[in-house]
Image (cartoon, rainbow, N blue to C red):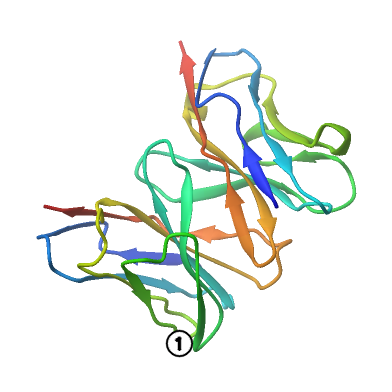
Amino acid sequence: AQSVTQLGSHVSVSEGALVLLRCNYSSSVPPYLFWYVQYPNQGLQLLLKYTTGATLVKGINGFEAEFKKSETSFHLTKPSAHMSDAAEYFCAVTKGTKYIFGTGTRLKVLA
Amino acid sequence: DGGITQSPKYLFRKEGQNVTLSCEQNLNHDAMYWYRQDPGQGLRLIYYSQIVNDFQKGDIAEGYSVSREKKESFPLTVTSAQKNPTAFYLCASSTSGTSYEQYFGPGTRLTVT
Protein backbone atom coordinates (compact mmCIF):
# COMPACT_ATOMS: atom_id res chain seq x y z
CA ALA A 1 0.00 0.00 0.00
CA GLN A 2 1.19 3.47 -0.79
CA SER A 3 2.23 5.69 2.09
CA VAL A 4 4.37 8.75 2.67
CA THR A 5 6.78 9.51 5.50
CA GLN A 6 8.16 12.97 6.11
CA LEU A 7 11.10 12.88 8.49
CA GLY A 8 11.10 15.85 10.85
CA SER A 9 7.88 17.68 11.68
CA HIS A 10 9.88 20.88 12.25
CA VAL A 11 13.01 22.04 10.46
CA SER A 12 14.91 25.27 11.14
CA VAL A 13 17.50 26.78 8.82
CA SER A 14 19.31 30.09 8.70
CA GLU A 15 18.52 32.54 5.94
CA GLY A 16 20.79 31.73 3.00
CA ALA A 17 21.40 28.14 4.10
CA LEU A 18 20.45 24.97 2.26
CA VAL A 19 16.91 23.70 2.74
CA LEU A 20 16.45 19.92 2.79
CA LEU A 21 13.04 18.43 3.54
CA ARG A 22 12.84 14.66 3.47
CA CYS A 23 10.13 12.47 1.97
CA ASN A 24 10.13 8.69 1.63
CA TYR A 25 7.34 6.73 0.06
CA SER A 26 6.32 3.12 -0.14
CA SER A 27 4.77 1.98 -3.34
CA SER A 28 4.54 -1.29 -5.20
CA VAL A 29 4.39 0.50 -8.54
CA PRO A 30 6.17 3.57 -9.93
CA PRO A 31 4.55 6.45 -8.13
CA TYR A 32 3.47 9.93 -9.02
CA LEU A 33 4.95 12.27 -6.41
CA PHE A 34 4.15 15.83 -5.41
CA TRP A 35 5.37 18.56 -3.07
CA TYR A 36 2.96 21.22 -1.86
CA VAL A 37 3.47 24.32 0.29
CA GLN A 38 0.94 25.77 2.74
CA TYR A 39 1.12 29.23 4.30
CA PRO A 40 -0.84 29.84 7.51
CA ASN A 41 -4.61 29.61 7.14
CA GLN A 42 -4.39 29.04 3.40
CA GLY A 43 -4.84 26.16 1.00
CA LEU A 44 -2.02 24.11 -0.48
CA GLN A 45 -0.09 25.22 -3.54
CA LEU A 46 1.84 22.88 -5.82
CA LEU A 47 5.61 23.33 -5.74
CA LEU A 48 6.56 20.54 -8.13
CA LYS A 49 5.66 17.03 -9.25
CA TYR A 50 7.28 13.92 -10.65
CA THR A 51 5.37 11.71 -13.05
CA THR A 52 7.80 10.22 -15.56
CA GLY A 53 11.04 11.18 -17.28
CA ALA A 54 13.80 13.26 -15.72
CA THR A 55 14.30 12.37 -12.07
CA LEU A 56 15.42 15.87 -11.06
CA VAL A 57 12.37 18.07 -11.02
CA LYS A 58 12.45 21.84 -10.77
CA GLY A 59 9.59 23.76 -9.26
CA ILE A 60 8.54 27.23 -8.30
CA ASN A 61 10.39 29.57 -5.93
CA GLY A 62 13.76 27.89 -6.59
CA PHE A 63 12.80 24.49 -5.14
CA GLU A 64 13.72 21.18 -6.70
CA ALA A 65 13.38 17.51 -5.83
CA GLU A 66 15.03 14.33 -7.02
CA PHE A 67 13.20 11.04 -7.45
CA LYS A 68 15.45 8.19 -6.29
CA LYS A 69 13.78 4.87 -6.91
CA SER A 70 16.51 2.86 -5.19
CA GLU A 71 16.03 4.87 -2.01
CA THR A 72 12.25 5.36 -2.42
CA SER A 73 12.83 9.03 -1.73
CA PHE A 74 11.70 12.36 -3.10
CA HIS A 75 13.52 14.94 -0.97
CA LEU A 76 12.88 18.66 -1.50
CA THR A 77 15.80 21.07 -1.63
CA LYS A 78 16.53 24.74 -2.13
CA PRO A 79 20.12 26.05 -2.23
CA SER A 80 19.48 29.24 -0.27
CA ALA A 81 16.61 29.77 2.15
CA HIS A 82 14.66 33.01 2.16
CA MET A 83 12.47 34.33 4.94
CA SER A 84 9.45 33.94 2.67
CA ASP A 85 10.04 30.16 2.54
CA ALA A 86 8.74 29.79 6.10
CA ALA A 87 5.66 27.59 5.70
CA GLU A 88 4.49 24.00 6.00
CA TYR A 89 5.47 21.55 3.29
CA PHE A 90 3.64 18.38 2.33
CA CYS A 91 4.79 15.45 0.25
CA ALA A 92 2.11 13.40 -1.49
CA VAL A 93 1.83 10.23 -3.56
CA THR A 94 -1.09 8.96 -5.57
CA LYS A 95 -2.94 5.78 -4.76
CA GLY A 96 -5.48 4.80 -7.37
CA THR A 97 -7.76 7.80 -7.71
CA LYS A 98 -6.70 9.23 -4.34
CA TYR A 99 -3.75 11.20 -3.02
CA ILE A 100 -1.92 10.23 0.17
CA PHE A 101 -0.28 13.08 2.06
CA GLY A 102 2.53 13.05 4.56
CA THR A 103 2.04 14.68 7.93
CA GLY A 104 3.94 17.79 6.88
CA THR A 105 7.18 19.56 7.79
CA ARG A 106 7.06 23.07 9.18
CA LEU A 107 10.04 25.09 7.95
CA LYS A 108 11.32 27.96 10.07
CA VAL A 109 13.84 30.38 8.58
CA LEU A 110 16.08 32.20 11.04
CA ALA A 111 17.39 35.69 10.31
CA ASP B 1 -9.40 33.75 -13.21
CA GLY B 2 -9.92 30.03 -12.73
CA GLY B 3 -9.79 28.56 -9.29
CA ILE B 4 -11.56 27.06 -6.31
CA THR B 5 -13.58 29.05 -3.83
CA GLN B 6 -14.62 27.97 -0.38
CA SER B 7 -17.00 29.88 1.79
CA PRO B 8 -17.12 31.05 4.42
CA LYS B 9 -13.51 31.44 5.58
CA TYR B 10 -14.52 31.10 9.24
CA LEU B 11 -17.63 29.34 10.55
CA PHE B 12 -18.91 29.02 14.09
CA ARG B 13 -21.64 26.62 15.16
CA LYS B 14 -23.15 25.22 18.30
CA GLU B 15 -22.93 21.55 19.08
CA GLY B 16 -25.80 19.54 17.64
CA GLN B 17 -26.23 21.68 14.54
CA ASN B 18 -25.53 20.51 11.02
CA VAL B 19 -23.43 22.87 8.91
CA THR B 20 -22.69 22.94 5.18
CA LEU B 21 -19.38 24.08 3.73
CA SER B 22 -19.36 25.36 0.18
CA CYS B 23 -16.84 24.44 -2.52
CA GLU B 24 -17.05 25.74 -6.08
CA GLN B 25 -14.55 25.37 -8.95
CA ASN B 26 -14.43 26.85 -12.44
CA LEU B 27 -11.47 24.80 -13.66
CA ASN B 28 -13.66 22.29 -15.49
CA HIS B 29 -12.23 19.52 -13.35
CA ASP B 30 -14.06 16.21 -13.09
CA ALA B 31 -12.63 15.19 -9.72
CA MET B 32 -13.24 16.95 -6.41
CA TYR B 33 -12.10 16.14 -2.88
CA TRP B 34 -12.71 17.14 0.72
CA TYR B 35 -9.95 16.96 3.34
CA ARG B 36 -9.81 17.65 7.02
CA GLN B 37 -6.62 19.11 8.48
CA ASP B 38 -5.69 18.90 12.14
CA PRO B 39 -2.32 20.00 13.59
CA GLY B 40 0.34 17.31 13.16
CA GLN B 41 -1.93 14.96 11.22
CA GLY B 42 -1.56 16.19 7.67
CA LEU B 43 -4.56 15.96 5.37
CA ARG B 44 -7.14 13.24 5.83
CA LEU B 45 -9.57 12.43 3.04
CA ILE B 46 -13.26 12.73 3.89
CA TYR B 47 -15.04 12.20 0.55
CA TYR B 48 -14.16 12.39 -3.11
CA SER B 49 -16.01 12.46 -6.39
CA GLN B 50 -14.71 11.50 -9.82
CA ILE B 51 -17.81 12.47 -11.73
CA VAL B 52 -21.15 14.22 -11.29
CA ASN B 53 -23.76 12.27 -9.28
CA ASP B 54 -21.14 9.88 -7.90
CA PHE B 55 -18.91 10.06 -4.84
CA GLN B 56 -16.95 7.73 -2.57
CA LYS B 57 -16.09 7.69 1.11
CA GLY B 58 -12.57 8.52 2.11
CA ASP B 59 -10.74 7.50 5.25
CA ILE B 60 -12.81 9.53 7.75
CA ALA B 61 -16.32 9.82 6.24
CA GLU B 62 -18.27 9.11 9.42
CA GLY B 63 -20.35 12.14 10.46
CA TYR B 64 -20.04 13.83 7.06
CA SER B 65 -22.14 13.86 3.90
CA VAL B 66 -21.67 15.29 0.40
CA SER B 67 -23.50 15.76 -2.88
CA ARG B 68 -22.30 16.27 -6.43
CA GLU B 69 -25.24 17.50 -8.48
CA LYS B 70 -23.15 19.85 -10.62
CA LYS B 71 -19.64 19.51 -11.96
CA GLU B 72 -18.66 22.83 -10.40
CA SER B 73 -19.94 22.23 -6.89
CA PHE B 74 -19.16 19.74 -4.12
CA PRO B 75 -20.68 20.87 -0.79
CA LEU B 76 -19.79 19.13 2.46
CA THR B 77 -22.23 18.80 5.36
CA VAL B 78 -20.81 18.27 8.81
CA THR B 79 -23.54 16.56 10.78
CA SER B 80 -24.18 16.43 14.49
CA ALA B 81 -22.92 12.83 14.39
CA GLN B 82 -19.35 14.02 13.84
CA LYS B 83 -17.75 13.72 17.28
CA ASN B 84 -15.02 16.31 16.91
CA PRO B 85 -15.89 18.65 14.02
CA THR B 86 -13.65 21.60 14.90
CA ALA B 87 -10.95 21.63 12.20
CA PHE B 88 -9.67 23.26 9.02
CA TYR B 89 -11.46 21.91 5.95
CA LEU B 90 -9.90 21.97 2.50
CA CYS B 91 -11.56 21.34 -0.83
CA ALA B 92 -9.53 20.35 -3.89
CA SER B 93 -10.12 19.48 -7.52
CA SER B 94 -8.13 17.87 -10.29
CA THR B 95 -8.29 16.55 -13.80
CA SER B 96 -9.14 12.85 -13.67
CA GLY B 97 -6.05 10.68 -13.58
CA THR B 98 -3.52 10.58 -10.79
CA SER B 99 -0.60 12.10 -12.68
CA TYR B 100 -2.39 15.40 -12.32
CA GLU B 101 -1.94 17.69 -9.36
CA GLN B 102 -4.73 18.85 -7.13
CA TYR B 103 -5.76 22.48 -6.89
CA PHE B 104 -6.82 23.61 -3.44
CA GLY B 105 -9.27 26.17 -2.17
CA PRO B 106 -8.35 28.59 0.65
CA GLY B 107 -10.06 26.47 3.30
CA THR B 108 -12.81 26.92 5.87
CA ARG B 109 -12.02 26.93 9.57
CA LEU B 110 -14.96 25.44 11.46
CA THR B 111 -15.31 25.92 15.20
CA VAL B 112 -18.03 24.06 17.06
CA THR B 113 -18.68 24.90 20.71
Residue at (90%, 50%) from the top-left corner?
A53
Q: Where residue B98 sits in the image (x, y, percent)?
A: 70, 64
Three-letter amino acid code of the residue under disc 1? Lys
**Taking A40 as reference, is B43 above or below it?**
below
Q: Nearer the viewer, residue B66 or B11?
A: B66
**Taking A14 as reference, is A53 above or below it?**
below
**Taking A74 as reference, is A41 above or below it?**
below
Residue at (70%, 41%) from the top-left corner?
A59
Residue at (74%, 61%) from the top-left corner?
B99
Identify residue for label 1. Answer: B70
Disc 1 element: loop
Q: Nearer the viewer, residue B57 or B105?
A: B57
Q: Chain of mark 1?
A: B
- Left or right: B20 in relation to A15: left
- Left or right: B50 in relation to B41: right
- Left or right: B89 in relation to B95: left
Q: Where residue B77 sits in the image (x, y, percent)?
A: 29, 72
Q: Nearer the viewer, residue B37 or B102?
A: B37
Q: Is residue B54 visible?
A: yes
Q: Where residue A3 sits in the image (x, y, percent)?
A: 65, 46
